[in-house]
Image (cartoon, rainbow, N blue to C red):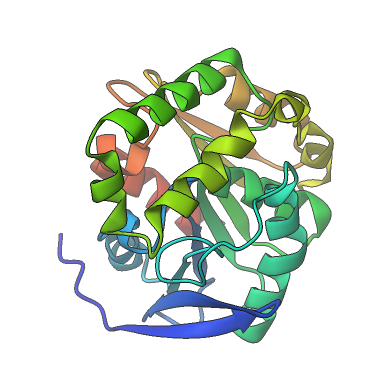
Amino acid sequence: MSSSRRSQWSFVEVRGRRLEVERIDGDASRSTLVFLHEGLGSISLWRDFPAQVASATGCPVVVYSRHGYGGSDVLGAPFGVDYMHREALETLPELLAKLAIERPVLVGHSDGASIALIYAGSRDRLTGVVALAPHVFVEDISVKSIAAAKVAFETTDLPEKLARHHADARKTFYGWNDVWLHPDFRRWNIESFLPGIRCPVLAIQGVDDEYGTMAQVEAIARAVNGPCEIAKLDACGHSPHRDQPEATRAAIAHFVAAT
C-alpha cells in the first residue's frame, strides 16, 4: 500500500515549550487523526505507520512529540507521577486549539493511549479514540518489564538506538523510567475517567504484550459509556502497529469509517 502523502513539519509552542509537529494531508471534511506516542516514543518512532493510516482512511493526520521527546524541547524538571494527566488536561487541549483541530480521533499507544482516554473522559469533543496497548492501572507485569528496560538501558546499546530519535536520550529515558518505577506510581489509576467517555472506542491489545494484560482493555470495555470494540491480536506484543501492522491498520480504518 502506498503511503505517499504530502507532510509538513513545524514547531508549535504549547505552555511555553516548543513541540515538533508533523501534519499529513487528507480530506479536510474528515476527522483529523492525532497520534499520541508511547513512553519512549516520538514522531520518528512511529515510522511510516501514520502515513499508512492516512492513506487507508483518507483522513488528515497530526503526529507530535511530547515535551522531552524527539526534537521537542528537552526535559527540564523530572516528570511527576501525574504527567499523563497534565498532558491530557493541559497540553493536548492547547495544542489542538492552536492547530484548529475540532473533534479529532485520538490514536494513542501505551502512555499515549492513556492520555487519549483521560482526555476523552474529561470532555465530550471527540469523534473517537483508538487505544493501542493502553494502561488504565498499573500491573506487576508493567513494572517488571520497565525495570528490565532500565537494565537494558544501562548494559546494552539501547542509549545509542534511542539517541537516533531523541534530542537527549538519557533525559528522555529516565524521565519515563523513574516515574514508572517510583513507589507512588503503583497507585496510578485512570479508571475514574472511563465512565465519562461517550465517543466510540477501539482498544487493540496484543496477546503477548509484555507490558500489560487483557485486563486493561476489558476494564475499558466495562466502564465506558459509548460503544467499545476490542481487538485482540495474536503473535503481538506491546506495539501492535509494529508487530501486526496490517491488522492494526485495517482495524483502525474500519473503525474510522464507521464513526
Residue at horizontal 31 percent and vertical 50 percent from the top: 162
**Residue 117's x, y, as percent?**
68, 46
> In the rendered image of this protein, does residue 257 appear above or below residue 175?
below
Q: Is residue 42 visible?
A: yes
Q: Quadrant of residue 210?
A: top left
Q: Is residue 131 visible?
A: no
Residue at horizontal 40 percent and vertical 64 percent from the top: 70
Left or right for 137, reference 89: left
Furthest residue toward front: 154
**Residue 108's x, y, as percent?**
52, 50
**Residue 237's x, y, as percent?**
35, 26
For the N terminus, give its image quadrant. Answer: bottom left
Residue at horizontal 35 percent and vertical 35 percent from the top: 153
- Along the viewing direction, whichever of 258 and 160 lies nearer the viewer: 160
Furthest residue toward left: 1
**Residue 85's x, y, as percent?**
74, 50
Residue at horizontal 24 percent and vertical 48 percent from the top: 161
- Along the viewing direction, whichever of 75 and 138 lies nearer the viewer: 75
Left or right for 199, reference 7: right
For the C terminus, give its image quadrant. Answer: bottom right
Q: How many marks?
A: 0
> In the rendered image of this protein, does residue 251 appear above or below residue 98?
above
> In the rendered image of this protein, does residue 238 appear above or below residue 128?
above
